[in-house]
Amino acid sequence: MKHRLMQWSFDHPKRVFWATGLLCLLALVMFPRLSVDTDPENMLPHQHPARVLHEEIKQRFGLSDMVVLGIVNERHAQGIYNARSLWKLAHISEAALAMEGVIDEDVMSLSLSDNITQGTDGEIAFHWMMRTPPVNDEAAEQIARWIKRLPLLNNTLVSDDQKAAALYIPIVAKDQSYRIYQQLLSVIEELPEGDEQFYITGLPVAEDTFGVEMFKQMAISAPAAGLLIFALMLFFFRSLALVAAPMIVAMATVIITMGAMIGLGFPVHIMSSMIPIFLMPIAVVDSVHLLSEFNDHYRPGMDKTKLAREVVEKLFQPMLFTSITSMVGFASLNTADIPPVRVFGSFVALGIGVAFLLSITLVPAYISSLSDKTLAAMARRVHSDETPNSPLARMLRLLPQFSHRFRYAIIATAIGSLLFSVVGIHNIQINDNPMNWFESEHPIRKADRTLNQHFAGTYEAYLSFSAQQPQENHSELKTILERAPEHIQSRFKTLQANSNDIAETLIDQQMNSSDDDLLWWDDIALAIDRANDEQRLFLQPEYLQYLENVQKALIATGHIGKTNGLVDLLKTVNRELHGGDTSFYQLPDSSQATAQALLTFQSSHRPGDVWHFVTPDYRSSVIWLQLSSGDNQDMSAVLEAMDRWFDNNPPPAGLDIHWSGLTYINVAWQEAMVSGMLESLLSSFVIVAVMMMVLFRSIGWGLIAMLPLSITISLIYGLIGFSGKNYDMPVAVLSALTLGMSIDFAIHFIERCRALMQHYGNWSDVRTAMFEEPGRAISRNAIVIALGFTPLLLAPLVPYQTVGLFLASIMVISCISSLLLIPSIISVLNNFLFAPATLKPHARGELTHE
């Protein structure tokens, strides 16, 4: 099959070109169907418990994802409390209300908030805090005094240091946030200049903006990396016509793979946006091996087709091995329970297969189609420059003796690096925050840093409490019915069977009853009300006191800037119901007093706000947590601390506790990713090891082939641990790239080494020969890929920088390991590895050992 496919490619190069072009055209037709998904929530399956509960809590309490706009004035003597700054805040608030995608009734701003004060007759009065901006700084200072008395607003809408004010803009969907972000920037640009600085942040903005900039960066970085790779190959092979082949392979591979993904209906996620970046080096590697071998052996007048066929046949097996192992590395990502990771792994594996097929068909067909004149010119340029005597070639010729003479020192160094790596890996910190995907000076990152320095926090999480199934307690009602006349009992059973709201039905019954029956119906109604009150948990002092204790415990964790909940609202209203006396800033002392406080709040301009903290049946309540950090480590620390607290302070009977919110969801998908990546890495590592033993038909050779891979993975992750860089989403995914590419050079080295042993029959000559053409091919590949992706280091998005750094590190470490460690080990074990029985008859008599 192999020979027929290659022969067909050599015999029909135009058909190969047409077939490749047709596949690319079909793939390009799919591109207009492209859809984008930049929501990290989709890292979790839709049915994941954390995600299901998150959506349920949002629906239950009418919660929404929010864009946070901050206005900071550090120059004015009164900080943000000056007429000019507050006018600007009010203007932006009004503009935000008119924006499509904004939930206007829930927008939080000073100009849309109530002040709670005493009325003229001692009653509570609700009036707009700043419905009309203050006319002077004295009026602005009065607003400052009001805010200090309102815990729900202080350090949420205005910072404690009085230098910043915030506008919280709830949105209907996260994918609206970038558009709203841009509209807000336009509104700010139209404002007159002043001392104020404006900042816009929030996880929805960060995630949606990253998605937009991700595509811009992909359109810049991928071509830049491609051009640099092209230039480097041109430097090595000195033929524009020849180096066009691997670039065509890389471009065709990316187009066909992305077209297949889009055509099958998969959206381009943060993960899958990196598929072109991952595929380009992998697609180029095999072509560089082929070109390097062809380039070193071609001379004017030679049969180009015959030489190309010999080159492909010689390299077919190592290229097949490397492609299969790389495919296994990425396909193993399907074991992770993260849909975008599975899509990413599957299509990178598909792309590797496409790249292999194109390398053994398109590249030979392309070479055979080149004119003899073009190839002769190439050969003259290459060999006139004495490529075999180039600085790279001369350096490589020093390595055979070096690797042999210092073999034990090299092996000891490798063992030392593994031990060093173990310590570093132990220090790895698992942490992620979508905000950190931007560079430090990105406007969104600066906004995040600035606003979280002023406010309690712009990151949100929610802790909700829900009553379990109500345990009906109608003992009083049962007693009354047992004493009631028979016609009352019969009528009540009928009403109960035919009414969804028995309390409402009883009101009608009371209005249409005789005086004697009315007394019975009154008693029945009172008994039902008292039974229902027992089920309205969050009107009862015991449950409210528990919520207050939970809020204190949350603040005590040291990671929560502020909590907002039903307790804060009730304490504020209760204080005003007692004349504004601060000693009454406490919870009402009975369920009736609590109900009265809530009824009073319904007279405000924003009566619906109470239902963001408690459900109308008073059986569920939620606490809004403000965190100044979106790092998973900080949210995880809160979860761990509160787990311990809840163990020591269990909730009242019948109460369930649940976490939700974007910051919590990020922890959930990060944990899933880390565990999924670890499982896939370990499983694929074992699979690749077994494959190496099977493919080389030797346990010894299989284990040796795994050494560069093992050292590369361990050393890279060890350095991550020592450097203090977090193990985040990009790093986790790059583990598959490490596995797929680190084994490449080892396979080529060992396969060529074994083939040369069949020819020379002694390790000394083989060692020398290995650092000629095979060594140059490996080195060229490492240099081309390591340097070719350095443009990624200049990208403004951190994940792209990470990919560039990883690619360079993988190439350098795996290349050095293959060229130094493997020959050193062979020098020690060549008696065992090259037993006479393993050699062809003509080589056995020539075998010598050192």
Image: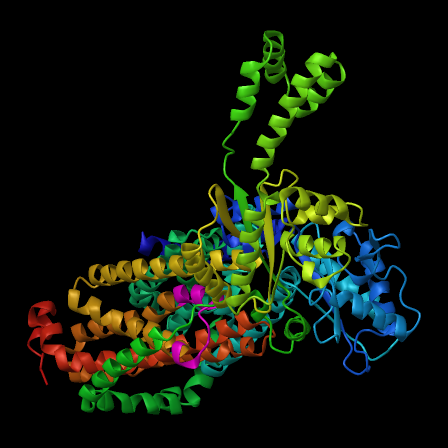
Q: Which of 211 and 758 is in front in this view?
A: 211
In the image: residue 637, left or right of residue 607: left
Where residue 771 appears, as percent x and y from the top left, is 28, 83
**Relative to residue 311, is residue 248 drawn left or right?**
right
**Residue at figure coordinates x 79%, y 83% from the top left:** 75
- Queried whether the magenta region covers residue 731, the answer comes back as yes
Residue numbers of the magenta segment? 721-737
Q: Where is residue 416 in the image (x, y as percent from the top left)?
A: 25, 83
Q: How is the rendered protein coloured? A: rainbow
Provide residue 50's location: percent of width, then percent of height: 50, 49
Residue 129: where, in percent of width, then height?
A: 83, 60
**601 shown above or below 482:** below
Left or right of 207 in this view: 507: right
Camera sees residue 354: no
State whether residue 807 appears in this view.
yes
* Location of residue 477 (image quadrant): top right
Q: Main secondary structure of the magenta part?
A: helix
Q: Nearer the viewer, residue 139 or 479?
A: 479
Looking at the image, residue 545 lies above or below residue 810:
above
